[in-house]
Image (cartoon, coloured by chain):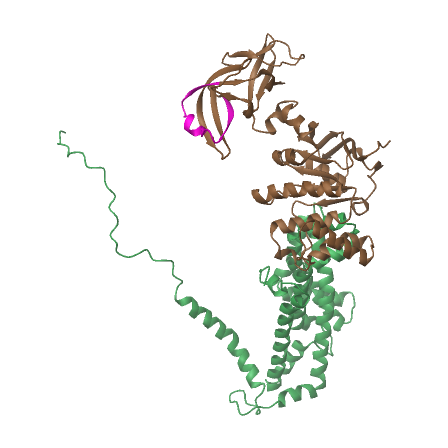
Amino acid sequence: MNEAGEAIRFDHVTKRFGNMAAVADLDISIRQGEFFSLLGPSGCGKTTTLRMVAGFEQPSEGSIFLEGEPVERVPPYHRNVNTVFQSYALFEHLDVTANVAFGLKRRKVDSGEIRERVKEALELVQLTGRERSKPRELSGGQKQRVALARALVNRPAVLLLDEPLGALDLKLRKQMQVELKGIQREVGITFLYVTHDQEEALAMSDRIAVMDRGEVRQCGTPEEVYERPEGPFVAGFIGISNLLPATVENGGVKLPAGQRFPAPVPSECSDGSDVYLSVRPEKIWLDEREDGMVSVDGTIVERVYVGTTTQVIVELSPGVRLVALEQNAARQRSDDRWEIGQRVTLGWHPEHALVLR
Amino acid sequence: MSAVRAPAAEPPVQAAPAPSKPPKPFDRPRFLPIFTGAFFVFMFAPIVIVALFSFNSSKSLQRFEGFSLEWYRRFFEDESLRESLVASIQIATVTMLAATALGTMLAFALVRARSRWAGSANILMLVPLVTPEIVAAVSALVLFTQIGWQLSLETVMVAHITFSISYVTVVVRARLAALNPEVEQAALDLGATRWGTLRLVTLPELWPAIVAAALLTFALSFDDFVLSFFTTGESPQPLPVRIYSAIRFGVTPTINAIGTMMLTVSALLILLAIMLPRLLGRRESGLGVLVGRETA
């Protein structure tokens, strides 16, 4: 039953709370050593999924396999997984060492080995020197590291992370993303990572499952979900959404205001069917053209300077807007060039547009 | 009407208000410190006087004539008073242990049980706190007489325990409700069984509240009069009841000595409530829990 190298398999797992399906027919398999993210807005079922793996919730239907073994009847304290909680959930009455050693002590590992492994784990998360501190004396980032060490020291088959960076400020979060990815590569443990931050998921994951209202909308590598989103939800949730309602016409699309241009219409979309046209902001050119580009005229309605780039929001017709990203490279400052109210021509290569149903 | 209009006034330049008095910052009323001072004087002056006169060498309650430990000696020589003191300590100790255990369990049930009766139970639990003690005392007396339980120290203990459970529950429940459920899940996740989680994580997290509740019930039971009076047997009687029967024959300085000792014991208990969690390496004190401060 078990494929070689499979860490977790969800076999048609459904979880209902009352009449509401928090997770519906989840059917994915996670490889050993993979950094796998569950990404979605709050209430999409990602945390419930994680809690079912940890053993805090039972599936209503279907089964979960951990390293090939079904885990329905296994209580949380006998599962070979550990969790890094969103609130860190450190034991306030114990110091850092005792927090990290907690799991090993429960497993009756001998004290010499415990000391050795706790030391290693604290080195791994760069907390050497804080062994005797109580959690209340630590900063948010340090608490996060203790929570990570406390879970990793047990060398679980799978590490479950529930929005572990959610409570940190932006700069620390970025730094921890890089560190966490490095740690995962170093220890080689399978990470099942829950987040609502699409950038975080894209930056860290080997594969991402994008969830919405209990269902997986797409499961694939970061490139796949970003470049080839399957459906308007994924396209809208990941990256800046440029979704225009459109109609299929003669193998191309027509916008509500009448503009027509070629687009890669999937074969199952017949003429006249309603679709969404999606173009990533960084693929849109402003007042510049290359051969084979489609072009649309519009008016600049807003300009948002965000440091390395400027978002230029262009209205094609009343209510129909596209965002274009301009690099603020050394040779130009785009806010010198783009004025609100200015007429511009937008262009993109047809293959960079997506037609989504 | 053809009133000639005044030339359009200049757009009214808001004249800066005359720099008369700077806005007065909110002052604390002066009489508040006086009030507070008066409160402490009224509260503590009689106690200080009782303590002072317990060391008086004469029997007078008006004039202090010299230092002596005469009244303390008399107290310890009086066998029935000594027995009463021991009885009160026994009652308070048993009440503290039993009510703390039961009240803590009740707090768990009220916070954790997902029952549709939980709401009603939460309110019912508060009833003993607002019931006039005399009603509770008479009910207990009627109950014990009806079932034929000879009034004795045990009946006092049972009445005290029943009465004290609610206090424990109120204190422990607040702490338990504030406990992050993920902390207990983390213990389960790290391989602790349910029993292990309770022992290693939940109870240690509740410890300051439990200590506070225990000391509170000890103090409540130790100086309780009404319940004790109605539910005690002939002999030995709890100390407050014994004192009451003694002063019916006139106030002697021995009473002052007893009062001073009870005060000292209570003060020591409060000190213990502050110190104990610190001695155990915790920054919170049991007292902090009682007065609503999380960290002392």
The chain whose colour is brown is A
Out of B211 and A330, give the one closest to the viewer.
A330
| Quadrant of the snapshot with the C terminus of chain A | top right
Percent x, y of residue A188? 76, 41
Direction front: furthest residue: A331
| Residue B65 against residue B293 in the figure, above or below | below
Verify whether residue A330 appears in magenta.
Answer: yes
Q: Dividing the picture into quarters, in which one does residue A242 lie?
A: top right
Percent x, y of residue A294? 53, 14
Question: In the rendered view, does A98 fall on the left or right side of B129?
Answer: right
Q: Residue at x 70, y 88 (%)?
A: B77
Q: Is residue A353 visible?
A: no
Direction right: furthest residue: A1
Q: Dividing the picture into quarters, in which one does residue B206 lie?
A: bottom right
| Residue A312 against residue B102 in the figure, above or below | above
The residue range painted magenta reads A321-345
The chain whose colour is green is B
Question: In the rendered view, does A156 fall on the left or right side of A92?
Answer: right
Verify whether residue B291 appears in magenta.
Answer: no
Percent x, y of residue A119? 73, 55
Direction top: furthest residue: A250
| Residue B14 against residue B77 in the figure, above or below | above
Question: In the rendered view, does B5 fall on the left or right side of B69?
Answer: left
Q: Dividing the picture into quarters, in which one does residue B131 lie?
A: bottom right
Out of B149 and B170, give the one closest to the viewer.
B170
Out of A166 and A190, give the one closest to the viewer.
A190
Q: Is residue A200 visible?
A: yes
Out of A339 and B39, give the one closest to the viewer.
A339
Percent x, y of residue B49? 53, 82
